[in-house]
Amino acid sequence: MTSALAASIEESALPRAAEDWSPLARWIDDGATGDEALGGRLPGGWPEGGEGDRSFRFRPMTGAVELELAESMARGPWPRRVSAALAAVLETVAGEAATVERVEALAVGDRQLLARALDLWLGQQGGDDGQRWMTAPCSACDESFDFSLHLAELPVKAAAPGFPQTTVELPWGAVELRAPTGKDQLALSLPPSDDDFAEAESKVEDPSLRLLRRLLCRQTAAPTGKGQKKDQKTAKAEALSRDQLEELLPRAQEALESMAPAVAESVAASCPHCAEVTAVHVDPYLALESASAKGILDDVHQLASAYGWTEEAILALPRSRRRAYLERLDRARGMRS
């Protein structure tokens, strides 16, 4: 079983106070209509920036951008796919041009918000209002049931003051931790390397301890005696023993959950068969997982066959315009009224 820390880092899904959350709609700019690209604010932002470094904006959603998105999801470890896919669809992130490296450096919660905002943006360009129907098994009676949700209403938690770092106090000293990023997710998806650890006896396969060691910034020693001032000498994170890491683990989890940005990954749905409430997982990366080059190429084939347009011209069309032409073709064939 994946430990609590690893689970919260990889998909930050632990409950917090309701007042800390606000709907996704509050993080999205108003007025992104028609072919205008959607934008908004990140709940965390660029690690070294201020309030002005939390903005993001997607590229106009053309077929070429959709195809680049789909192809980015076809290769590499999952965290790298996410970074490449988001970089493909973003114009800017945290105040600068979006690159794979910049997206990879964002906090996990920011990456999840971008993926969910993309789902909303793709839906708007396809003519839907963000409503999604889901099917889930009831945790009480095991019957499957359908329910709907609105993407814009799913909650988001802003990073706490002091982001991207927080401090944990222990009897042997204070430890500074930073928020986990896409780069950390990528490292955990690969085999352990000698670079992850300083001491041979600390080379462990446990992903929680590997991750925790990556998130350590520095350790300041505790006071050495009564009445003495705290020793300001700091030690490198790699100097912590495995016993110290295991003692730190639960405290680190709590501190990181309080400090880091997050998106809700589950909703409470009432079963119509027995009226019990079931917690249902809502994947923030659904828009990325469903990206497919086949659908876009099928659209190109239909439009090229009907109008004689080139692939380049069709892929340059906005998603909404491409859909409008395809609907007209369907009506002409009697497939739509």
Image (cartoon, grey):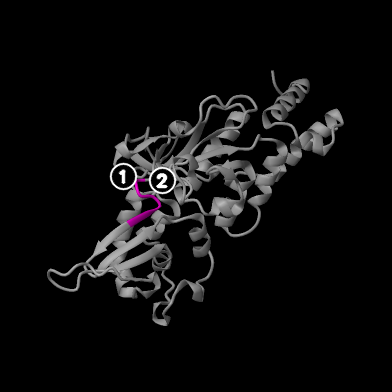
Q: Nearer the viewer, residue 176 or 18?
A: 176
| Residue 262, quarter of the rendered image | top left
Q: Is residue 161 magenta?
A: yes
| Residue 205 falls in image quadrant | bottom left
Q: Which mark is residue 262?
A: 2
Q: What residue is shown at x 49% (from left), y 43% (from top)?
A: 53
Q: Is residue 266 magenta?
A: no
Q: Residue furthest left?
A: 226
**Image quarter (top left, top right, bottom left or bottom right) of the N terminus:** bottom left
Q: Secondary structure at mark 2?
A: strand
**Residue at image mark 1:** 16
Q: Which residues are magenta?
A: 160-166
Q: Is residue 1 visible?
A: no
Query: Disc 1 residue type?
Result: Arg
Which residue lies at the image location 60% right of the left edge and 46% below the top edge? 98
**Type of residue at label 2?**
Ala
**Quadrant containing the C terminus in the rendered view:** top right
| In this picture, residue 15 sits left or right of residue 82 | left
Q: Nearer the viewer, residue 229 or 167?
A: 229
Left/right placement of residue 156 relative to residue 230 reads right
